[in-house]
Amino acid sequence: MQIAILIFEKLTALDAIGPYEVLRNVPGWEVRFVGSEKGPIRTDCGALGLNVDYPLDEVTEPDVVLVPGGEGNRPLLEDESVLSWLRDVDSRTRWTTSVCTGALVLGAAGLLEGRRATTYWPYLESLRRYGAEPVAERWVEDGKVITAGGVSSGIDMALHLVGREVGPEVAQAVQLGIEYDPQPPFDSGSPQKAAPELVDLVRGVNGESGDLAALADG
Amino acid sequence: MQIAILIFEKLTALDAIGPYEVLRNVPGWEVRFVGSEKGPIRTDCGALGLNVDYPLDEVTEPDVVLVPGGEGNRPLLEDESVLSWLRDVDSRTRWTTSVCTGALVLGAAGLLEGRRATTYWPYLESLRRYGAEPVAERWVEDGKVITAGGVSSGIDMALHLVGREVGPEVAQAVQLGIEYDPQPPFDSGSPQKAAPELVDLVRGVNGESGDLAALADG
């Protein structure tokens, strides 16, 4: 199995690296980081440099494609070279997937039309403009398209994908391998669980930049 | 606050990127990726390129230092330039931290002597050789040293650190910002929860390479 993870300037790193760490641990699976141009890119806050190893035209038959989120994917919504690559590879993938606002890119490519889907919670209703039915779940599988919620949800979605593709035992071995036995010290990871004022705060920040760091001055 | 994350050839990416995604979201906090030499490195399986932005001698007063794990950190256990840098920065940090087998590097630097500490579960007993008392918890805080368990545990540890340093509200906002409301589809993330045969399997693989991908031929 070949997995293509699309990366780009100003992506949110964990959207991509969470699933990568799951999928790369499956025996025989190969992960490739692809993008519009080969070479270095920086994450949303600029603090981390990642590398695009493959330009889009060198990865044309991935079994799985994954689109992460981050403010940097907004230009992709109108980037026909990326959108047509997505439509083309989707015609042959076993699974077409997204994490966080990566779902908006799948939507812009026309791949969510008539499907149930999810995305990062402040953007959930935006899915309607792509003909999708928004669903507030950790991940949503509809046909071969699996969309995940915000940032960290890609870990859960990737384990689900491994379970679907090669069975629960391998997925459980990978889960143990990455010691994924989450014990968050707080319980505010969703808008249903967090205090209303924090929900308003994070929603407000995301309206601008998707980056809590903007709170530094506020 | 300045956070220095030590990275190196063949690190396990999620060990570093999980905490990065938490810590970089705290208003006013700056994350720097430091290493022995400035420039590109590759993760343990080789599939991902990251960048060392700062050589060790350019980051001498971080408030937090974090050492991730991965098979690539074994050479660091005998790399005096790295160990003496760690001892030096530790003398001024507010928090000295590790994820996964990063604890072994802290141990080799002499920073776990007489402390309760944890690490990636197959390596827990190895902590004794550094004078530490192994504790099978998700993360362990002893004085200003916080060690976390394997790979994904760094996310929990980093949220704990944010809570300790700037209070629960900011930590909860960050948790909501990264939608960290874990819902793993399986419950096998620790050796206490996974099937015994999976524990033996993963422990065996880790004896060699720390990489489940080695199972491809087995």
Image (cartoon, coloured by chain):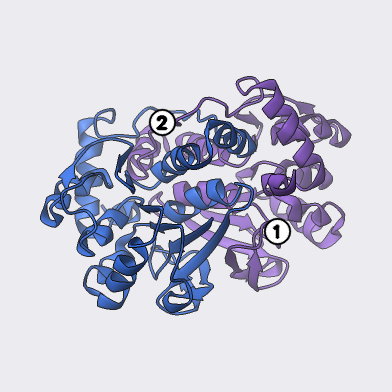
Chain colours: A purple, B blue
Q: Chain of mark 1?
A: A
Look at the numbered disc 2 and give the secondary structure of its residue: loop
Nearer the observer, B216 or B15: B15
| Badge 2: residue crowd in 10 Å (few <14, some 14–19, many ≥20) | some
* Residues packed near mark 1 inside 10 Å, few (<14), some (14 to 19) or many (20 plus): many
Q: Which residue is mark 1?
A: A10
N-terminal label among 1 and 2: 1
Foreground: A164 or B54?
Answer: B54
Q: Is residue A157 above or below residue A32?
A: above
Quarter where residue A166 is shown:
top left
Secondary element under disc 1, as helix, strand or loop, is loop
Q: Quickly name the residue at label 2.
A: A183
Kindly indicate the quadrant of the structure image that contains residue B102.
Answer: bottom left
Horizontal and vertical percent for residue A14?
A: 56, 49
Residue at (71, 25) in percent of width and height: A197
Residue A6 showing in the rendered view? yes
Residue A198 marker: none
Q: Is residue A123 above or below residue A50?
A: above
Q: State the residue at coordinates (26%, 71%).
A: B75
Q: Is residue A123 left or right of residue B47?
A: right
Marks 1, 2 in one chain: yes
Q: Dividing the image into 4 quarters, which one contains the N terminus of chain B?
A: bottom right
- Residue A136, percent from left and from top: 68, 24
Q: Chain of mark 2?
A: A
Q: Nearer the viewer, residue B66 or A62?
A: B66
Q: Amino acid at mark 1?
A: Lys
C-alpha distance separating marks 1 and 2: 29 Å
Specify whether B116 is left or right of A72.
left
Q: Is residue A76 above or below residue B190?
A: below
- Name the residue rendered at 64%, 52% in the picture: A12
